Amino acid sequence: MNPAAAQTDHTTIELSSIGQIAITISDLDLAIAFYRDTLGLKLLFEVKGLAFFDCAGIRLMLSVEETRGDRFSSVLYFTVPDILAATKALEGRGVAFDRLPHLAARMPDHDLWMAFFRDPDGNLLALMSEVRRSRE
């Protein structure tokens, strides 16, 4: 079946999951070393000017900028069970945090904690942890 030729009811289309996130970088080798070696993400494959990593089933694509200074980024929030331990581990690998772990929001049944840091190109990344509160 040719997807372009398929008849689709456009009113029933729902976007529900993310398959890939792209970040523009300036130096592919430096970015691969950071995301693979410093953050510990699994490198799936590399092709000319691109590297792909697995983030628990969501693919992260690093793409070398086509025009100098032509960068686009989203903030990536990595979920961790213990934000203090994760921060300490990343600091041990040389990551400098813009903002150390802090309470971002109190939810009805948990607290949302976040910490922010950057990759070698200055792209903003974050750790997030949802900490359940004990019932008192």
Image (spheres, rainbow, N blue to C red):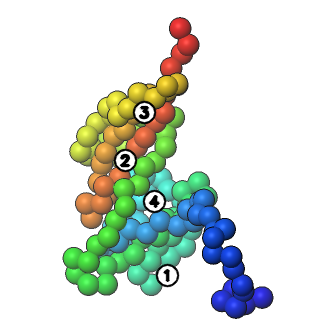
Q: Hey, which quadrant is residue 22 in on the image?
A: bottom left
Image coords of residue 35 (percent x, y): 42, 59
- In the rendered structure, are the residues bearing label 4 and label 2 in contact, judged by CB atoms less than 8 Å apart? no
What secondary structure is found at the residue carrying circle 2?
strand
Residue occupied by mark 4: 36
Mark 3 neighbour density, 10 Å: few (under 14) some (14–19) many (20 or more)? some
Q: Is residue 14 left or right of residue 103?
A: right
Question: Residue 126 — which label?
Answer: 2
Q: CA distance from mark 2 to mark 3?
A: 12 Å
Q: Hey, which quadrant is residue 33 in on the image?
A: bottom left
Image coords of residue 14 (percent x, y): 62, 64
Q: Is residue 4 left or right of residue 28?
A: right
Quick check: 110 above or below 41? Answer: above
Q: CA distance from mark 1 to mark 4?
A: 16 Å
What secondary structure is found at the residue carrying circle 4?
helix
Please give the name of the residue rendered at 27% of the width and 64% of the height, measured from the top-left corner: 121
The three-letter amino acid code for the residue at tag 1 is: Val
Residue occupied by mark 1: 47
Residue occupied by mark 3: 112
Q: Is residue 4 left or right of residue 64?
A: right
Mark 4 neighbour density, 10 Å: few (under 14) some (14–19) many (20 or more)? some
Name the mark nearer the viewer: 1 or 2: 2
Q: CA distance from mark 1 to mark 2?
A: 27 Å
The first of marks 1 and 4 along the sequence is 4
What secondary structure is found at the residue carrying circle 1?
strand
Name the mark nearer the viewer: 4 or 2: 2
The first of marks 1 and 3 along the sequence is 1
The three-letter amino acid code for the residue at tag 3 is: Leu
The three-letter amino acid code for the residue at tag 4 is: Arg
- In the rendered structure, are the residues bearing label 2 and label 3 in contact, judged by CB atoms less than 8 Å apart? no
